Amino acid sequence: MKIALAQLNFHVGNFELNTAKILEHIEKAKVEGVDLIVFSELSVCGYPPYDLLEQRDFVYSCINAVNDIATHCSGIAAIVGAPSLNSNPSGKQLFNSAYFLSNEKIQQIVNKSLLPTYDVFDEYRHFEPNRQFNIVNYLGKKIAITICEDLWDDQPTENSFGRTRLYTRSPMEELSKFSPDLVVNISASPFASKKSLIKKSLFTGHAKRHHVPLFYVNQIGANTELIFDGGSMVVNPSGNIIDTLSLFKEDFKIYDLDSAKQDVSEDKAADIQEIEKIHSALILGIRDYFSKMGFKRALLGLSGGIDSAIVAVLATEALGSENVRVLLMPSKYSSDHSVKDAIDLADNLGIQYSIVNIQPIVDSFLGVLIPLFETEKLGLTEENLQARIRGTLLMAASNRFGNLLLNTSNKSEAATGYGTLYGDMCGALSVIGDLYKTEVYDLARFINRQREIIPENTISKPPSAELRPDQKDSDSLPDYSVLDDILFHFIEMQQSLSELLTEGKSEEASKKALRLLNINEYKRFQMPPVLRVSAKAFGFGRRIPIVASLPR
Amino acid sequence: MKIALAQLNFHVGNFELNTAKILEHIEKAKVEGVDLIVFSELSVCGYPPYDLLEQRDFVYSCINAVNDIATHCSGIAAIVGAPSLNSNPSGKQLFNSAYFLSNEKIQQIVNKSLLPTYDVFDEYRHFEPNRQFNIVNYLGKKIAITICEDLWDDQPTENSFGRTRLYTRSPMEELSKFSPDLVVNISASPFASKKSLIKKSLFTGHAKRHHVPLFYVNQIGANTELIFDGGSMVVNPSGNIIDTLSLFKEDFKIYDLDSAKQDVSEDKAADIQEIEKIHSALILGIRDYFSKMGFKRALLGLSGGIDSAIVAVLATEALGSENVRVLLMPSKYSSDHSVKDAIDLADNLGIQYSIVNIQPIVDSFLGVLIPLFETEKLGLTEENLQARIRGTLLMAASNRFGNLLLNTSNKSEAATGYGTLYGDMCGALSVIGDLYKTEVYDLARFINRQREIIPENTISKPPSAELRPDQKDSDSLPDYSVLDDILFHFIEMQQSLSELLTEGKSEEASKKALRLLNINEYKRFQMPPVLRVSAKAFGFGRRIPIVASLPR
């Protein structure tokens, strides 16, 4: 049996595009004599559809598209993902389903059993879990179809209070009773740094335990915050990876079922550094946000610092230098080297820049505010004012030129509230809001691995917001190497202060970090969507009440 | 048996405060010879805790507090709500539990069976559903304890594609097999306009069907967006409401079980207008946001229009006139009557106001932007600029005086994107973001029911943003009476365009509204939290992807 894996980039709700892509690959597979072609989870509508699943038209558009695709399945079978209606009048309205199509008809519908409802996933919000297990018979072979989380019944967790067995059922245990000839897993599994090892061990573990080949097809492409990395794979019954599909791009490959049973001495999976994956993920995240929203051009403020430098580089790689425009907006607190560093970077990238001195605008605000406030010492108010004037200028340029504003905040800043709401926290998309400052430096070094794109001075100088004379980040925050380590333990590992202290973290720095983290939920609530590259990003996957009495 | 219902305002994570409140009411009940005192769902930690339930310290603080409370239960029993640990190694880590405390010990733990996972509720994210049903025996009586959603197995839905039976189990059917003497329901059921009738019919229906008295205790108080209205009640076995507790404030009442079985000729429930409930809800929402966040004073921009007028009134009622400060920020497009109307309102309310002419600041921006943009015609850019200058001034005043900025956008504006991000969309809390413009007028008339607080001219003049000469909202939007009706059908009822057209709505207005609704998800993503008073508010309970191909 010849099996094709189609790893494609779907656009949520774009039924015309998604169906056309699916049909194009079915035709391609037919030409190659493929017996079965497999698409990813909810491929027909794109993942994640969220509450669009509550709209009748959306659901029927999915079902109509599946029926349409089925009519093209002659001489070939296809597995596509789409919601299906729950015929039981009790329970959630829908199932998250794999449709098995052949002979121009829907032959069988297999429903997802394990519904992830944690972090960024809300599947039980819309779907009823499957409780009846069945196999698909096709060309004399028994196919066990699983959907994403169905193979994640026993998953490791970073959270020290988390648990590995979130479900009371194990679909593979149930399906193995049928002695399947192969397992198919259709997924929409988003990228998170360091997650690929976990994923591989889950898949190879299942294949080995049940001595069955496994064909895994993942979605690729970004939909708002979530970046799907692809990396579809075939695992042999000994639990070795026979082959993988590309990371971060569409791919299409054909395998023979028998050859997928062959022995290999070791996993045939590319060994890619995590920082390179993050780099690719962020570029894909920007590119898809723009292309799927119908925009071409980006805009950002370039300060001479490392955060905006990185975002400018990533935007240029994603959209092309002709589509990126930057504003340099010095005030009287800006150092000369900041402007020079920013110009050097813009020149290196070949992007258009303009310099706007914000001091006259600062002064016009002060002319109004000093009498109103009855004081000449504005302190933090003046710092925030500069940031908000820059935000306003950037939004004006965005209005005027139609370039979308990119946000340049990093995760350390977002965590500690070291940023101005409606100022440097503006933007349509936060590009590096899921990278700690230390990771931003790692990425800068990766970007400069062959030649100096980001000026060395930008990387080597001490970080500063330049909102008051001789300001340094280290005036207000612990050193980033200390801070980021602490934040990781609070955010990703969800540890408590007492656990951190037991592990020997600095008490002063830990208390300060926890207090800042906890008093700034209100700011993060109004952040732009953050491209997610870690196991726990700010935004949709981390839901902390604003009004709460938290350790501070 | 004497039963006390304690309807209290809890602060999420404030274990000291919540425990003290619970203990105070246990002591009060003891003095009155009460046999059983009932507190609301998750009373020990406050509802909703969201992902704090993923933190070990938080969960153990809950359990420690329950153990502490238990030691005070001698000569009395108490039912308190808190998470409990799932001892099965599979499934979610926690249950959402009712602890039955007596003889200074935890006697029994009853777990919630139906976990709401829709709209603003995410309970399956953290909790495993109960599958084993049991009764509590106390003083010779059999008590069926249920937790909130457990009695909502058959609930009406506004969404035309929604369904009424979201669960495959019915806890009351299971519990009725034990022939209970009474049913207790502990809840954290947030206010939504028009929901109280549904709630009453569910409770009276269950009591009548199973011929058993029902004691319902709801949380009151606001936690960020969610406003819990209280309204706890006692229903007799004939399905009539014997008594209700206060709406929107703490209450404590004692009932005799036998007298709760008496017949009454009709429901003893106060008949309060929906607009009065919304008024009370918003005041409570503001008051609790401030008091629980540790703030006293509010700030807002007063334009002379109806939206900011309403917010100023509500803030004054919530916080006192001495704690509300307003800025009037006219530009050259502001009409004279706008300033006068705003001053009249400020005088009526006795709140402090300052007038800041923004024109010099507008001009300083234009001095920079006109050369940069190579045009004198800024159009929409200049409109947004004015709004952002006002936002920046308000945030500066917030920085300087420590007053929290209140947002004044309404639901019609938020729906259509008729507002400026980082401009009039600024603020810590959106007060009327869940009220359509027509409802804002209703509320203004309610506020003026006895005397003219909001100047009549503010109510009667045509709505205008005053960002360009002679601008009117009706230049850009359908009439609000038409628009709001259409938006309600799209948002609350989740109908499709074709359904609206079938019902005879205007095609032009419906298409325009749907397009505007769908292209503005990105703006709403960065809105402040919105006080929720409808069945479908923007924010946490409505999850539409930003990057999606929606009808437009």
Image: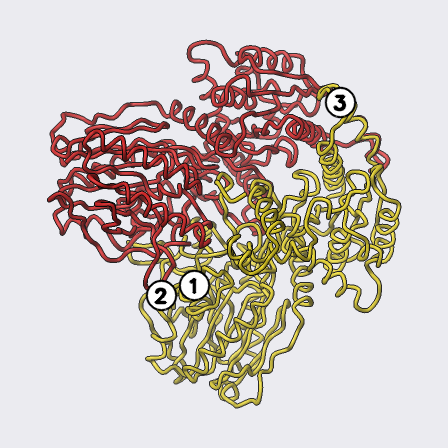
Chain colours: A red, B yellow
Q: Which residue is mark 1?
A: B163
Foreground of the two, A369 or A146: A146
Counting from the top left corner in percent of width and height, residue B285 is at 64, 58
Q: Which residue is mark 3?
A: B370
Q: Which mark is residue A89?
A: 2
Instruction: Chain letter for mark 3, please.
Output: B
Counting from the top left corner in percent of width and height, residue A158 is at 37, 40
Q: Secondary structure at mark 2?
A: loop
Gap in angstroms between the C-alphas marked 2 and 1: 8 Å
Q: Are marks 2 and 1 in contact (CB under 8 Å)?
A: yes
Judge from the rendering whether residue B135 lies leftward or rightward of residue A400; answer left or right: left
Q: Amino acid at mark 1?
A: Arg
| Residue B290 seen anywhere in this rendered image of the structure | no
Foreground of the two, A551 or A146: A146
Query: What residue occupies the far top of the structure in this picture?
Result: A451
Q: Amino acid at mark 2?
A: Pro
Residue A413 drawn above or below residue B47? above
Residue count near mark 3 (Cα–Cα under 10 Å), binned few <14, some 14–19, many ≥20: few
Please tell me in which quadrant of the rendered image residue A375 appears: top right
Please tell me in which quadrant of the rendered image residue B149 appears: bottom left
For the point 62% across and 27% down, which residue is it?
A: A475
For the residues beneath circles 1 and 3, the answer to whether they share a chain is yes
Q: Quadrant of the C terminus of chain A?
A: top right
